[in-house]
Image: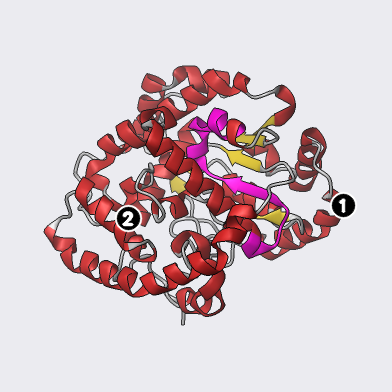
Amino acid sequence: MRSKAFSFPVTSLAGSSVPNIIAQVKEHRIHPKYYGKLSLTFLVASIFEIFNSWERVRWGSRIQAQAVSQPPVFIVGFWRSGTTLLHNLMCQDPAAAYTTTLQTVFPHITLSQGWWIKDAANLLLPGLRPFDNVKMDMGFPQEEEFGLTNIQPYSLYNFFIFPADFDRIVENELFPDMFTEKQLEKWQKHYRAMVGKAMLNTGGTRYISKNPCNLVRMTLLKKMYPNAKFIFIYRNPYQVVESLYRFVLAIFPGVQLQAVPEDFNREKIVKLYATMMRYYLANKNSIPASDILEIKMEEFVQDKMGMMNSIYDSLGLDSFSLAKPAMEKHLRETESYSRDSYEIDPEIYDLVNKYAPDIVEQLGYKKTATHKVAVHWG
C-alpha cells in the first residue's frame, strides 16, 4: 500500500552521495530533533555508494557521449503557475525525454537499479502530491532541480531541507553569477550529465525541462544549449504566491533537517517572487524572440490542446500530430482530479501590492485590494 503522508524516516538526501551530504552538513546546522533522520539518511546513502560507483563505470562514457540533437525545451515560470500541467502534457510526446521522479530522488543509480528501486520507492511515495492532489509516481516527469540537490550542493531547493537558512540560500544559491568560475563549471557539468542520463533513461530525443529556478538561468542555458527553446507560463500573482506558501509548508515535513522558523512567512515568498520575476522580465530579451514563447495560464487551461498546437507551431517543434493522441489521453485520465480550494490570505494582497505592483501590471493583471477570494485551482 502506498504512503498517504508526505513524511519519511529519511530526508531526500538519502538518494544523494556521501560526499554531497557531507558538503551540505558543513554548510548548514542540523537541528538536534533531526539527528536521527540525518543518521538514517547517511546510512542509506552509504549503502547505495556501491551502486553509485557501478553506474559511473557502466554508464559514464555513454552519458557523456549522449548528444542533445533536437532543441531542448525549457519550461520556466514561478512555482504554481501551471508549469506541471504543461510539462506533463509535453512529456506525453513520444519524442520527449525528461527527468523522472526516480532520477531526481536517486540520480546516481537510475539507469542501473531503476528496474527494482522504482517499485520499491513507489511504496513510500504518496499516491497524491500534498496540497493539490496531483497523482505521483516515480516514473512521472519531475523538475530536475530536485535531482540537482542530490548531485551537487548549490541549489535554491536546499531551503526545503534547511528552512532556517532560507534567506542565506536565496542570497547565495539562486543566481548563477553568485558562483565562482569553478563552481559554475562543475554545476554545468552535472547539469549536462543529468540531461544525458534523462535521455538514456526515457529514450526520448528532445529534452523537456520544467524548472522554476531556470527563470534566472535562461542566458546561461542558452549558452549551454544554443538551439534551446523557452516557454514562460505565468499566472495571477496573488494566487501564485499564496499557493506556493501553502505548498512549501506541506513539503517541509517530508525532507527537513531544520525546524521551520517562526519568521518563515508569506512576505518571504512574495519577496522571492518579486526578485525572480523582475529578473526574468528584465533579461528575457536576451533570448531571440523566435526561441521564447509566453503564455497565460488562465488562457491555457481554457483550451489546452489548442494551446499545445500553438506552442509547437510557434517554436518550430515537429511531431505534434504524433503527440496529440497521447496528450488527449492524458487529459482524459486526469480530468477527474479534485484539487482542494483555499482562500487567499488578505495579507497577500498587501504584500504583492507593496513588493510587486510593477509585475502585476507588466503581466496584464489588475491590481487588487485586500479581500478574500476562494481559489479552486492549485
Q: Quadrant of residue 243?
A: top left
* Residue 248, position as x, y percentages in the image: 37, 49
Q: Name the residue under label 1.
A: 321
Q: Residue drawn at (30%, 58%), measured in percent from left and top?
A: 19
Asked which colour scheme the image uses, the reply is secondary structure
Q: Residue drawn at (54%, 53%), measured in percent from left and top?
A: 194
**Pointer 1 and pointer 2: residues touching (CB < 8 Å)?**
no
Q: Going from the N terminus, do you reach mark 1 or mark 2 first?
A: 2
Q: Residue drawn at (82%, 54%), measured in percent from left and top?
A: 324
Q: Mark 2 points at which residue?
A: 20
Region in magenta = 200-222
Left or right: 296 in relation to 188: right
Label 1 to label 2: alpha-carbon separation: 43 Å
Q: Residue furthest right?
A: 321
Left or right: 120 in relation to 70: left
Q: Nearer the observer, disc 1 or disc 2?
A: 2
Give above or below for 263 relative to 326. Answer: above
Q: Which amino acid does label 1 sit on?
A: Ser
Mark 2 lies on a secondary structure that is: helix
* Residue 291, position as x, y percentages in the image: 71, 30
Between residue 359 and residue 165, name the one nearer to us: 165
Between residue 24 and residue 69, name the one nearer to us: 69
Label 1 crowd bin: few (<14), some (14–19), many (20+), radius 10 Å: few
